[in-house]
Amino acid sequence: MRFSFNPVSPEFQAENVMEILIYGTINSVSLALYALGFAMVYGVSRLPNFAHGALFVISGFITWSFLNTLGLNYLVSIVLAMVATGIIGALIYQFILIRVRGMAISEIMASYAMGLAILEGLRWGGFKGMTYTLPAFIEGSTELAGVSVDYQRLLVVGIGVAVVALLWLFTHYTRIGLALRGMAQDERAAMMLGIDSDRMAVAAMGFGSMLAALAAIVLLPLGNIVVEAGYNILILAIAVCIVGGLGSWMGAVLAAFLIGFAQILTVVYLGAHYQMVVALLAIILTLILKPSGLFGRQKELEERV
Amino acid sequence: MNKNSIKGLMVLMVAGLFVLSSGIVSAAEPIVIGSPLSTAYLYGWAAERGIKMAIEEINAKGGVNVGGTKRPFAVEVIDTRDLEPGVPVSEALLAVEKLILDKKADFIMGGPVRSEAALAAMSLLSKYKKVSILTTGVLTPAYHATVAKQYDKFKYCFRIHGEAKNIVGEMFANFTELREKYGFNNLFIIAQDVSHARGAAKVMNDVAVKKGWNVTGVEIYPTGASDFSMGLLKAKKTQTEIINIWMDMPESAILLKQWYEMKIPALPFGSTLAAAEQPGFWKATDGKGEYTLCNVVNAGNAPSDATPWTMKFYNAYTKKWGVEPEGLGTSSSYMAVYVLRDAIERAGSLDSDKVVEELEKTDIMGVYGRLRFDPKSHQVIPALDPKEGAVGSILQWQAGKRVVVYPKSIAKGSILLPPWMKK
């Protein structure tokens, strides 16, 4: 079952260029937002935070609860939810992950277990169903070059670009940011310069969790908050980071655009059915062709051998 | 009183106590209904609530008369998680087997909820000779076709809610009406990548072509997909007038929000469109879901006067659970318990073969019409008139309310078009 008209005809292609550009960009920025928190934590502390998807989801529910249960202002709810998620992430590191630091498999298992505990806890607490939603920041839609697009999606792009820019400024011009970069580049050298490795790892986990929360708050108004999304977000974040190169933030952004546009092109030319395959295929191809990813600083397989 | 009289009296007292105590044990021994349900999803929790409510009502009236002994119903629920993305069918099978072997379920009721899992569970039910009544989720026609094909093996399997072929018929009845009224002719189909939805999309496509509809596209979205913009743009570009949606995943709410934000000039007409079935849909979408149509499969899942029992059930459910019946699987799960009680009482036993015989003879007026099973396929017999069989319900969101628009025999309103596609 396929789309009935010819997708390679010139008219079809001309009509689709703008759609692909606009929705490809939106999809790519969304993927980058999903992945930045994961990339930051791994970049600084070499910790694959498999609780990332759960932190994304819980921040959505925290915002919802502040907004609807406590009746707080939307902006206040957002700020408080980001802080709360950051604290949760930092606590997970301080009390759980610090004990298995340096043991890669144990780190994955422990963080995944924490993610499961959060998601199952939410479900147990009654956060199920399809009626948990966050309001859009700006209602309505407009037309860009004849393509209909809503303001919230345009805002996603704006916020995504701003986040990347602020992240760059933060890591280049602030003490904590520079310390985080120092850790990311060479942990031992950073420690010799007096940077506390564990404190920086806690900070990275906190900031990474806040980035997950920011992504959730920006993207969840497009749909609804459901526990199951946590697993999907985690897979997409991992796919982006592996393709971009684990530990590289800019690699993650570039990979987000590669995967994002590949997904949209797949939907247009092959069908939505294959959309999810793109991310998984990207992981497999990267691991076969360039295991270190596009900008990964891990040594390539040949070099290691 | 001589010694013999005292002995006789003692024997009588002991015998009396024995009879009395055995009677009490029998009365206290519950008939266990095992319910494998995906409880985190609407079709799971709504079924659980329906079953529990019926059990409470029946137990409050003394329970089930099994060959002269009153026994209460009890329910054991295991979360199969089969509606969740990535959860293998084997999880649901483990749940069914655990209910039978560990929880000692006398009957299985409710799920598994996903068609793939329910089809796989048929062999287990056959192996353990456990009577099962499906009440929610599973829409695949393959289920009752399998029973009809291998009756002796799968005779323990029943389904008391509507199935995909019948739902397709109901949809086309409405499409035809819309064609006559507004001249609609372009149909775009969006389905989730799961067995019943894929199958239904194919059937919809085939039937639409046969009926002279122009099928402008068919898109199958993977479970968990969260962006539908390209599909919706395809629909818009091809002058689609009706978007037929087969999707029970929560992300279907995103599809409907996108439809509204992009002002796609096509009527979203769903089936198993779980997000839009729930009464909370309106608030969750800030009214963006207005004009969305969805098939809630059986009457009683939305307000109507199909039978005198419909609103009685509807109001009792709302009072008990603090929310109106929310969608597919609610009224059917409730009725399944009454139908089972009826069959057990007529069989006078819990013996599976005897209960199967009696279930085949079921003929009661329930919440969504006259309930009878096809004796060969064990599928509940559908009808457009509640006096004849089990009636469906198609609702449309209008001004914050779920208004039943089909079938005409129970309709509370008619289909409205959004202002951006007024003809």
Image (tube, coloured by chain):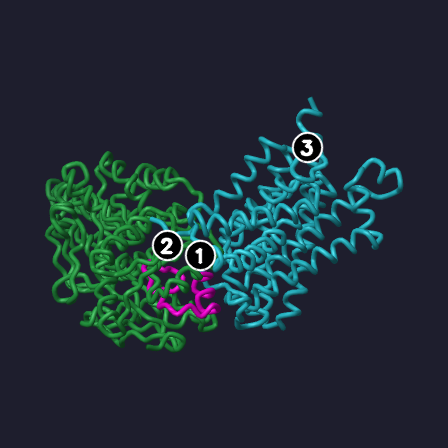
Q: Which residues are magenta?
A: B250-277
The residue shown at (62%, 39%) is A242
Q: Which amino acid type is shown beneath numbered disc 2? A: Phe
Earlier residue among tags 1 and 3: 1
Chain B tint in image: green
Chain A tint in image: cyan
Asked if residue B287 lies in the magenta stretch, the reply is no
> What residue is pinned by disc 2?
A5
> What residue is pinned by disc 1?
A12
Tell me if A88 is positioned left or right of A1 in this view: right
The disc placed on residue A103 is: 3
The x and y percentages for residue B289 are 42, 69
SS label for mark 3: loop
Quarter of the image for residue B8 reads top left
Whole-number angstrom distance, CA of label 1 to CA of label 2: 8 Å
SS label for mark 2: loop
**Do the numbered discs 1 and 2 sit on residues whose CB atoms are within 8 Å?**
yes
Locate the C terminus of chain B and report the quarter of the image it occupies. bottom left
Tell me if A270 is positioned left or right of A255 in this view: left
Earlier residue among tags 3 and 2: 2
